Amino acid sequence: MSRRSSRSSTMDQGEFILECKAAYLSMFDSIKEKIESQDSLLEALQQTGRNPSVKILKKYWTNDTDELSFDDFVDICKKEPVTTSDDLMKAFRKIDINGDGYISLEELHKILTSKGEKKSKSEVKKMIDEVDENKDGRLDYKEEPVLFYSEFCQMVMSTTEESKKMQRKMMERKEKKKRQDIERRGDISGSQVSVRSAASSVKIGTPAGSRKSSLLSIDDLPRPSPRVKKDKSRQGSVSRAHKLDEPKNLREWTHTKSKGSFFMEDGSLICHQYDFNLPDDSKIWITIQPQKGSRGMDSSPVDTSVFILRDRPDEDGNLLVAFTEHRDSRGKYGVSCDLSAGKYYIMPYTTGCRFKSRKSESGKEAKLVSQDKGGKYVITKSFRKVLEDIFDYSDLDGNGFMSRKEFNLFNIRTSGEEVADEEWQVVEDRIDLEDGEITKAGFLQLNELEAEDSEGDTEDLWTTLVSMGYNKQLVMDQACPFQLDVYTEDCDDAELDVVRVDSYPTYPGDLSFDDIISKSFIKHGEISRVKGMKDLCMYTYTNEGWATLVLDNKSHTRVRVELDCSRSENVTSNHDSLQRTLRVDPGSTVIAYHLMPEDDDRDWQVKCTETIR
C-alpha cells in the first residue's frame, strides 16, 4: 500500500477534516478566509506535517491561481502525503555538511524548518538539550549514527504530533470563545446579533432552530471589532485577526524593495527612512515585516508599520496620506492606496511595545579576536557569523553586495561620519571589489584588517556591534531589521530611495512625527470625553495589531491625567508600567499608550480608566 492511500485509510474522514481545519485556523481566523499566496499555501501545509517540494507547490499554485479556499486546501491534503520519519531521516543525514560527526543548532534548525512542522530556534535548542550529553550545543552521532537518527527522528515526529494536538485545542478554544462572544451580545437562536467587523457594520441573522452543534457552525461569523465604552472605563475586547488582502493581480505590478532596520539609541527610535518618487498616478501596495532572525527565533515579532507622507501639506494642511493597519499571521503589515504623481516620504514605525531599551547588560563579554599559531590576530567564528548577518542587513537592495551608498549608511550608523573619497579609496586598495561593490568576503576582510591593525584591541569592533544593536553576548536586542516592499500598478519607473538612518525629522509647520500620527489616530479612533474636563478628550484607535490611546487637550490650561490600564488582559505596552501620569500642555495631543497582545495566540482586551489630578 502506498503512503498516499495508507494515510486516508487509517484516518476517519471526519477526523481528517478536523485536523485540516485545526491547521488552517492556526493561520487564519476563519475557514472562509482564502489562501492568497504560494508561501501561505506552503505554510498551511507545513502546519499539517506536510512538506511539499517546489514542484508539488507549483502543481497547485499555478500562474493562473489567485487564491485557494479551505475546500481546496483539504483536497490538496488528501492528495499529498505527510512527511514521515523516513523523509526526515534522509534529509537529516545531509545536514552534517563537513562530515565531522557533529550537527550544530543552526544546521538542525535549518532542517526542522524545511521538513514537517516548523520549529522555532528555542524549540530546536530544547530538543538538542535532551540528547546533548556534554552540553556543547552540538549533537554527536559518531558512535551510533543509525540509533541516533532513529531515536531523534522519532522525537521530532512525536513533537509534530504534540503540535497538532495543540492546534486542536486552540481551535476548540477559539470556537468556544466565538460562541460566548455571540451569546453575550444577544440570543443567537431567535434574534439578530449586531456585530461590527473591522471593515464595516453588518447584521447576522440566524433563524430559530438552525444552530448546529458542529465546530463548523460558528466559523462563518465575523469577529467583533474592538469596542470602547463611552464612560470613565474604556474597554476594548480585541480578537486575533490575521487578514491581509493583497491585490489579486499583484504579480503584474512593478515591484521595488529595500531592507532597513529600527535601532534603539538612548531610549529613542532611529530607523532607515525613504523618499518615494512617483512619476505617474498609480495605485500602490506597500508591505513591511520584520526579517527572520531578528530578536531571536523564539520572540514574538516586532510590530512594523509604514506611514506615507506628502512632501508638502494638502489644502487641509495634512501631510499623512495613509498607513499600514492590516497584518497577516506572520507580522507583515500592508496598505493599499491611490497616489497622485509626486514625491512622498515613506516612514517605517514601531510602537515600542516589543522593541524597548535594554534595562541592563550582564554576562560574560563574547570574544571577538584571537591569535592563530603564527601570532596573527583573527576574528572569532562567532564574531564572523554576526558580521555576516550585519552585511546581509546592510545590503539594503539584497543583491549580495554592499554598494558605496550602503557602506556609507553603515558607516554613518557605526561612526557618525560619511565615507569620504579618500576613505573609499582605502577600501578599494585593501580589498577586492566586484563591479565597484564590497563582497561579503571583502567586508569580513575589512574587519580582520581592523583587528590586525589594532593588534587585538576590540574597542572599535565593539563600537560597530553596539551601534548595530548587539549586546556583549552578540545577541541583537537593540535593533530590528525589516523588509519593505513597494508595488505600483500603473507606474513602471517609481523610485524608492534610502535617504537616511536617523531619528524622525521635523516637518513643515514645525510638526513632529508624533504630531502627524496622533492626528491620524484621532481621526480614526473612538472619542470619549474625560470626566470633569469639557475640552479634554481621549481617543482610542485600534487595528489588527495594536491599540493606541491619545489625549487631546483643547483647553487653555495644562492638565495632569492619571491613566490606569492595569486591568487590561494579555497586553504589553510601550511603557514599563500600565499605570502612569501624563502632563498634557494646552492645545496639544499626547500619545499616552500603545498596547498590543503579549501572546499573539490569545485574545486580548484593553481596559483603561483616567483620573484628573
Image: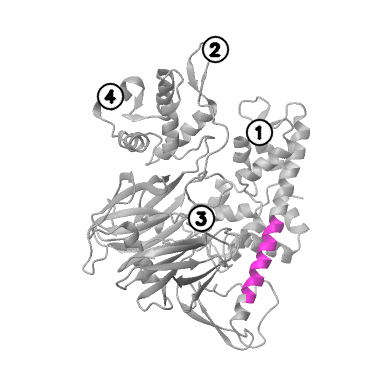
Q: Which label was assigned to residue 373? A: 2
The residue that label 3 is drawn on is 576
Q: Which residue is mark 1?
A: 137
Type of amino acid under label 2: Lys
Figure coloring: one colour
Calculate the distance from the C-alpha at mark 4 to the C-alpha at mark 2.
32 Å
Q: Position of residue 426 (x, y in %)?
A: 30, 22
Residue 530 shown in magenta: no
Instruction: Judge depth for marks 3 and 4 and give the one in front.
Output: 3
Quadrant that contains the C terminus:
bottom left
Distance in Å between CA atoms under marks 3 and 1 = 34 Å
Name the amino acid type tagged 3. Answer: Asp
Q: Secondary structure at mark 2?
A: loop
Side of 45 where 585 appears, left or right: left
**Lower position in the chain sequence, tag 3 or tag 1:** 1
Q: What element does badge 4 sit on?
A: helix
Q: Main secondary structure of the magenta part?
A: helix
Return the residue at label 4.
Answer: 425
Say whether disc 3 or disc 4 marks the residue closer to the N-terminus. 4
Return the residue nearer the eye: 265 or 100. 265
Residues in magenta, as a range: 164-180
Earlier sequence position, callout 3 versus callout 2 = 2
Q: Nearer the viewer, residue 264 or 420?
A: 264
* 3 vs 1, front mark: 3
In the shown orientation, is residue 335 left or right of residue 142? left
Number of numbered discs: 4
Query: Would you say 367 lies left or right of 158 here?
Result: left
